[in-house]
Image: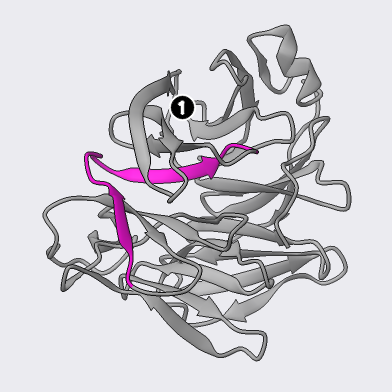
Amino acid sequence: MVHDVLSDGFLEVVDPDAAPEKIGGGFDFTEGPVWHPRERTVVFSDMPGNHMRVWTEAGGIATFRKPSNMANGNAYDLEGRLVTCEHATSRVTRTGHDGGIEVLASHYDGKELNSPNDIIVASDGAIIFTDPGFGRMAYYGVERESELGFRGVYRLEPDGGGPRLLASDFDQPNGLCLSLDEKRLWINDTMRGHIRVFDVGADGSLASGRVWAEVTGEGPGAPDGMKIDAEERIYCTGPGPGIHVFDRDATHLGIIRIPEGVANFCFGGEDMRTLFITASTSLYRVSMRAAGAALRF
């Protein structure tokens, strides 16, 4: 058995014997994979390598952008444009269909953001991102002092304007995902080792934040990338190393084991039943029984 089965519900997620397949390697530290359903590509980041790459079934690995300003998290907006978190510049940017790059956010209250890390797009086009301090550390970014006195979570409205602060009481906010009806937002805290859930107001504000699950286990790894599937199960990186799977009631179902430390992952493939995983120096994929949540573009 390759993966750890903690509950029978895990058998609906993945075959316990479905071994991860390595489809790329030799990188420095991979992050931020995102699937494009029409182009059938996975774009992902290599922060220390200052390099974004793209994978296709036919062509394997190629350069997407270099230098990349030590890009980390990526997502597609409702028009299929790539939005990216940059560690070296503390910016959120958007890549247009013509390849032009637009800065969406760089400061809050007149001070430079810490280092935008992970990012999602809501069905109304709003962009939500986390802003921990990892990109101001050596190797993962550019070592420098933070201008802000906290590490927050922000929202960019569809009609533009500066980022709106949603929460500031995290140690290091990282991965995040919305419920299927977008009435709840899960955000994990890498240093505290847990996932919190918030109620989302009609205006996008957050309320009633509470710890939803602890991400615990043996071996290296911590909460980082996080996703939701079509049945509203939550997937989060953590000790193992691997990807911890929780049912909608926070029951820990099992761990998808990966040979290297996992930073992030995304669902993809024609039926959204392939998990693409950025793990340290490599890119892996695993065939799933569960399907990822429907894409928004």
* Residue 119 appears in the figure: yes
Whether residue 279 is in magenta: the answer is no
Locate residue 181, reporting x and y percent. Answer: 63, 38
Is residue 259 shown above or below 58? above
The magenta segment: 162-180
- Residue 187, compared with residue 109, is above or below; it is above
Q: What residue type is labelled 1?
A: Pro
Where, by quadrant of the figure, is residue 104 drawn? bottom left
Question: Quarter of the image containing the N terminus?
Answer: top right
| Colouring method of the image | one colour
Local SS, label 1: loop
Residue 128 falls left or right of residue 292: left
Q: Residue at the location (32% across, 71% down)?
A: 162
Q: Which residue is drawn at 33% across and 44% down?
A: 173
Q: Mark 1 points at which residue?
A: 239
Judged left or right of residue 239, residue 43 is right
In the image, 109 versus 291, the foreground residue is 109
* Quadrant of the image containing the C terminus: bottom right
Residue 20 falls in which quadrant of the image?
A: top right
Residue toward you, 138 or 197: 197
Q: Residue at x 31, y 75 (%)?
A: 89
Q: Where is residue 188 in the image (x, y as percent from the top left)?
A: 40, 36
Residue 187 appears at what percent x and percent y?
A: 42, 38
Residue 174: say if magenta: yes
Residue at 47% over, 84% down:
102
Q: Nearer the viewer, residue 208 or 249?
A: 208
